[in-house]
Image (spheres, rainbow, N blue to C red):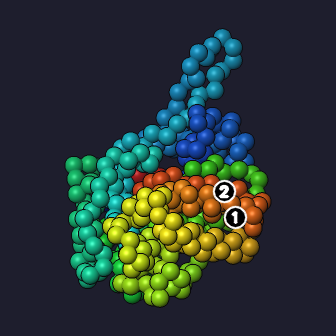
Amino acid sequence: MHLSPALLEQGAPLRFGHPTHPTARVLHQIRTLPHATRVLLRDTLGLSAPSVTRHVRSLIDAGLVEESAPQGSDDRVGRPQTSLDIDARHVVIWGAHVGARSTTVLAADGAGRVIREADVDMAVSGHAPEQTIARLAQGMAAVGRGLPAPVAAGVAFSAHVDHAGRVTSPAYGWEGVDPGPLLGDALGGPVSVTAGVSAMAGRELAASPISHGEPASALYFYAREVVNHAWIINGTVHRAHSGRAPGLLLPSAPDGLHPLGNAALVQAAQRRGVRVPDFASLVREAARNPRVRELLDARVDHLAQAILLSLEVIDPEKLVLAGDAFHLDRSGLRRLVTTLRRGWGRVQINLAAPQATRDAALMAGLHPFWSDPLEYVGA
């Protein structure tokens, strides 16, 4: 891989936020403001006109930005403002998201357009971490086969990632595993690591233009096989380690399952005699079985209390809900929103895109490149 090892703090997980490097900030605005102009870049970033010109020229020369005259412009009336759009088709990144029960790997270009995507058939629990990481590296290499070498690669884990990049997850059966060096050895270059919910929240920031005003604060709450959250404050993602949740639906969560996760909920239903293989089936069963609906609603109420507690702590302007717990169980989502409106009515509530795990895989690979793009393309 054509990577710059000095750009990664060895062992440290990714820290998501709006870029600080001037050239990266210019690229960020061009990505997020359709058909941006140099004047718009100057006004939104507070840069001088010569600085904007210099940074734009560097990005164009590196093949990361393209410019074009607006359609229907008339050269007889002054000089038309050219518009700027991201290009970066020649740049390739690799990303992955490792879930408790499913893993996604992908290759994308430097603009974030997915080129290839695949699911890796592997069970994290029940295998040694080294075996899982080797299988993950094989999957990442396979999805990038035949493409230009990646300039950056990253993996998001649906688990706690500490300050040194070590992963601990009862669902994985991992305790203090350091996947970065193992992946780097397998793939031939530095591989960044992050918690999945941090990368998902980072995607929210990556899609929003930088503004002069005070950045909006947000709580990003994810519920699928695990339940995690991250805070977006002052243009930066903060991931708190919330510890282990108590067994609210089961006396104890078996096999390391999160007690409020989908798999634990399915097992709780099975112990009550409901024969369903997965969470989607459980939601369908709830439409005709009041006992199952009560079980789902119990989980919804516990999630609502957890969210309300977090809202009281940070008082964000926006709440983003992500994961199958919300996307598949729409009746539960309505119940949750009603409870949240009643308890904390002033927050804006948004539902994240369904492909949150794919977004996490994207951001794990893209964020280092977007933070300092010219270093990664050797410009």
Instruction: Label 1, secondary structure: give it.
Output: helix
Seen at 56% across and 80% down, the residue is 241
Position in image of residue 278 (x %, y %): 36, 66
Image quadrant holding the N terminus, namely bottom left
Horizontal side of residue 307 vs 357, given as left or right = right
Q: Name which residue lies at 26% across and 69% down.
A: 122
**Residue 185 visible in rendering:** no
Whether residue 215 is situated above or below residue 298 in the rendered picture = above
Q: Nearer the viewer, mark 2 or mark 1?
A: 1
**Mark 2 sits on what residue?**
349
Up-down relation of residue 344 to residue 172 (above or below) = above
x and y percentages locating residue 104 in the rendered image: 34, 60
Q: Residue at x 27, y 73 (%)?
A: 123
Between disc 2 and disc 1, whose residue precedes? 1
Mark 2 closeness class: few <14, some 14–19, many ≥20 residues within 10 Å: some
Q: Which residue is mark 1?
A: 340
Asked which secondary structure carries label 2, the reply is strand
Q: Residue furthest top?
A: 76
Which amino acid is tagged 1? Leu
